[in-house]
Image: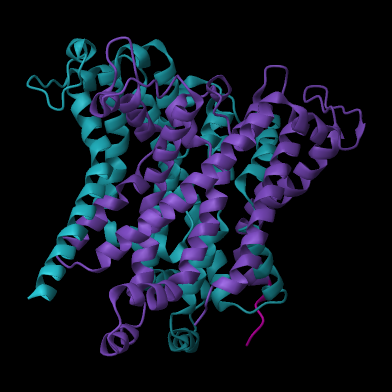
Chain colours: A cyan, B purple
Amino acid sequence: MNERIKKTGSKILIYLLLVIWAFIVLFPFYWMVLTSVKKTSAYNNETVPQVFTTDPTLENYISAFTKVDLGRYFVNTLIFTVATTALMMVVTIPASYAFARLEFRGKTLLFSLFLSLMMIPTELVIITNYVTVVNLELNRGIKTYLGLILPSVTSVFYIYLLKENFEAVPDELYKAAKVDGTGDLKFLLKVMVPICQPTIVTIVILKVIECWNSYVWPRLITREPEYFLVSNGIQTIRESGFGRQDIPAMMAAVVVVSVPLIVLFLVFRDKIMAGVSRGGTKG
Amino acid sequence: MKQNNLKAWLYLLPAILFLGVFMVYPLVDVCIYAVEENYASIARTYTGIGFGNFRDVLSDKLFIQAPKNTFILVVITVPLSTGLSLLIALGLSSIKTLKKAFQTIYFLPYVTNTLAVGLVFMILFDKTEYTKGLVNLLLHTDIDFIDGEYWMKMMVTCLYTVWIVMPFKILILTSALASVNQEYYKAAKVDGATNSRIFWKITLPMISPTMFYLVITGFIGAFKAYSDEVALFGTNLNAAGMNTIVGYVYDMLYSDTGGHYGNAAAAALILFAIVFTITYINLKFSRNKVQYM
């Protein structure tokens, strides 16, 4: 009898702890959405912040797009994310294949070199990359996109992850393909990629999250506001008058920026969480 | 196996190009910058080779505050977040209903933009001319969290940092706990071991490599803190007294007088040296404590 009471008791405690933490995690999101639907005048008049509103409005979402350049930042971020991820695929897939399936002189040495590059912190390389970009004028005008995209393309981590996955594909398939006379490229594209599609999807999503949330690099090199991304765009809005006077509209902007990734996460949740725990690095 | 030299190098060429230009070259370059004294970015001249940049950085008032902030952040957030996530992971491992739901919720901060969510945190804590802010009202206090005393700001920063890093740790620990061989637990139960004994003698040692990994990466991550602080306090971290080492590096790149690349490089190398040393100490320490099976 005592055992059962103790067990139920501890179960209750555990659930209590989990619920409390869930609340702590969710509350900022709730507050974000709540504030974004409050009328600005009402919000500014609250001496005691209300935890719900009886008078919701969508006007903040409209001002978020009309009063500041949120739409522009969105488009820029979209372009940046798609281009960088696409380029990343073009670079990573052949490289992982080469390490996994091809034999060549210097293979071990090169791979060790690649691995050691993983240990280099971004803070060290960012200085020179900044200078490179400035010298090549990749932070002016339309070339800003190049300045944003190119340094962000390659990450050894994804090459490593994909290589492991390629290696797990049985040799028999490769040998059979060779017997058929299939070239490496065809084999890679028609066989390897489809088989390893889950990992590739994971890599793509992780890269998308990385690009969408990227802040430091865009902040560093974009000079002209029309090329800002959502992260440094939000930061600029916040420090301008708009940010100080119209908090509900700022929150609307924040919601709009956060929603795409949250949706992506909810759809691909298992793949994302599996990818992150395998890799163990955020980037 | 057939040698595919040309083909392999061709496949690897894009990767090698990108990595060479944006990783290898900068690595060498940053060391050169660090020792070229008084590098004037516009004129591209420098006055000599030496460690003057390092001296400049270490004596800069603005720099002194940064490592102090960073160290406090590291010392507070790493144990706190690791311990708390262990607690939560343990809780998650012992329930079945709603487990997936909880895991999904807990992972949310990982996929969000820190600039965006940090803003919300700031608003919750901020004291404006209209209102004392939600947190103050809940706690019946009147503290200026965002623009006031140093320790209040530090507390908010630590809170936010812990909030942000928990998803990753919870995820990693939950899978680590799941991979512990159930046989050990069964044997212990048969022997009549209490839950407490089981935890300290079986669970903890079995997941010690993971714990250790989280502590190390936690340290490294906390040393590189920057965006979270900007999310809370805005880009002028020096005004808020909340600058971090990384923030200082970026400040040096930017300054209106034309960019002190030398100083930035020196500060970055100092950061790298600190992180490297701490990681090394951690590794040495782990030899005795971590059990690998």
Instruction: Quarter of the image for the N terminus of chain B: give it.
Output: bottom right
Q: What is the x, y in percent for residue B73?
A: 52, 41
Task: Please tell me which residue lies in front, B145 or B46.
Answer: B145
Q: List the single residue furthest toward the right.
A: B48
Q: Is residue B207 left or right of residue B262?
A: left
Q: Is residue A33 magenta?
A: no
Q: Is residue B81 left or right of residue A1?
A: right
Quarter of the image where one finds residue A119: bottom right
Which stretch is magenta? B1-5
A84 over B89 or under it: above or below = above
Q: What is the x, y in percent for residue A69?
A: 37, 20
Quarter of the image where one finds residue B67: top right
B89 over A81 or under it: above or below = below
Identity of the residue drawn at 68% across and 48% down: B274
Q: What is the x, y in percent for residue A123?
A: 63, 43
Identity of the residue drawn at 17% across and 15% down: A39
B279 over A66 or under it: above or below = below
Identity of the residue drawn at 25% across and 20% down: A248
